[in-house]
Amino acid sequence: MSSPGDAGVFDLSLLGWTDSLAADLPAGSVPGRIAQVHRGAAEVITAEGRRQARYSAKVRRAAAADPVMLPCVGDWAAVRLVVPEGRYELDGVLPRRTAFVRGGVSRDVRGGLSGDGQGQVLAANVDVVFVAEPSMHGTDLADLGRVERLVTLAWESGARPVVLVTKADMLTLGLHDLIKDVEGVVPGVPVHAVSSLRGQGVEIVRDYLGTSATAVVLGTSGAGKSTLVNALAGREAMETQQVRAGDGRGRHTTVHRELIPLPGGGLIIDTPGIRRVGLYEIGDGVERVFADVEDLARLCRFDDCAHNGEPGCAVLEALQSGALPERRYESWRKLQREAAWMARRTDARLRSEEQRKWKTIHKEMRKSGRNRP
Ligand SMILES: Nc1nc2c(ncn2[C@@H]2O[C@H](COP(=O)(O)OP(=O)(O)OP(=O)(O)O)[C@@H](O)[C@H]2O)c(=O)[nH]1
Ligand SMILES: [Zn+2]
């Protein structure tokens, strides 16, 4: 059996290729899924196998004007063979269904924000986001606030979140209660216990990918992301912290992003530390994760209640009665502020600009494809 990535012909639908993507492919080019990006070139998986493809002048110009236009892991690219030279050229990126975007934002340990608001796409065309939260992290239990934050981010990317309580073997007593607590803070999102070390829950994770879905794994450093990816891939696709600890360079986080085709179809993108990833689009991520709090807020006497001591504030009442835990309230406020901050800074401008650019680029791609002999 040939598998994606081996030389030889294989089925692109196992990489997520669809008819609707095919409709956007310019004439004269073949599709390739970007597995890794380098400076000025990308490694793409095509029906013929893996190829290095240099960016065309058009792609370089577009990326120079706006980093959001840089090809990224998970993108579907239009690849052409440049005949006299015999090399491959990446001549365009097909429209993205979903995207993880870093808004040029850096975040200090206390959650402060700074940055220029310039977008950068970290991963594209992701269907499922696995939020990996270790049952035990050092001596701490799973961090519910971190789960809320990452699930919010997942919703905003356009993909579907699934929470995995990883390293489940480290917590035998109380695991059930912990899962219940996690379920309680992300309404409507499936939560599963996973131990990659023992192989527990790995099949459930695998099932989310079917034959052609693409997933990313988000989570704090040491959450067991690489170990899970390796368990899914059935091989050492990613270096884990243990492996790295032995190489003399000491412990450090995963630094590169790579799209890894899994045996039997489906793909997974291992992401480096997500601490710098901000909420980019003012989507409905916060409302979805905090649906219970948002419901309360609708009961406040004033429509524009800031939940800051106004009379008849249902949120503060719930807080005082203990129905709404202080931790969750604070988490809600923080993520609301963050989303609002990003929205003010970049969202409207970037979104409209990006849409406009995609339109012209695809018009050009189609035109140049048709005119080519
Ligand atoms: N007990 C237990 N340990 C695990 C499990 N999964 C991973 N670990 C250990 O946790 C440590 C961190 O695992 P990694 O997979 O490297 O974590 P990561 O999330 O990829 O970390 P970064 O690359 O730094 O973001 C390693 O020592 C793993 O062996 C598990 O299911 N159970
Ligand atoms: Zn209120």
Image (tube, rainbow, N blue to C red):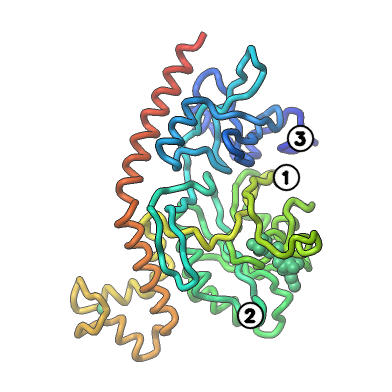
The mark nearer the N terminus, 2 or 3, is: 3
Q: Name the residue beneath numbered marker 3.
A: 6
The image shows residue 366, relative to residue 146, as above or below, that is above
Q: Is residue 289 visible?
A: yes
Mark 2 to mark 3 CA distance (whole Å): 42 Å
Secondary structure, mark 1, is loop
Secondary structure, mark 2, is helix
Tell me residue 3's x, y (percent).
Answer: 75, 38
Mark 2 to mark 1 CA distance (whole Å): 32 Å
Tell me residue 89's x, y (percent).
Answer: 59, 25
The image shows residue 306, relative to residue 36, as above or below, that is below
Three-letter residue code for mark 1: Gly
Image quadrant for the N terminus? top right
Which disc is residue 264 wearing?
1
Residue at 34% from the left image edge and 51% from the top image edge: 347
The image shows residue 369, relative to residue 37, as above or below, that is above
Q: Of residues 142 and 16, which is closer to you in this image?
A: 142
Residue at 49% from the left image edge and 30% from the top image edge: 59
Q: Are dots 2 and 1 in contact, CB under 8 Å? A: no
The mark nearer the N terminus, 2 or 1, is: 2
Nearer the camera: disc 2 or disc 3: 3
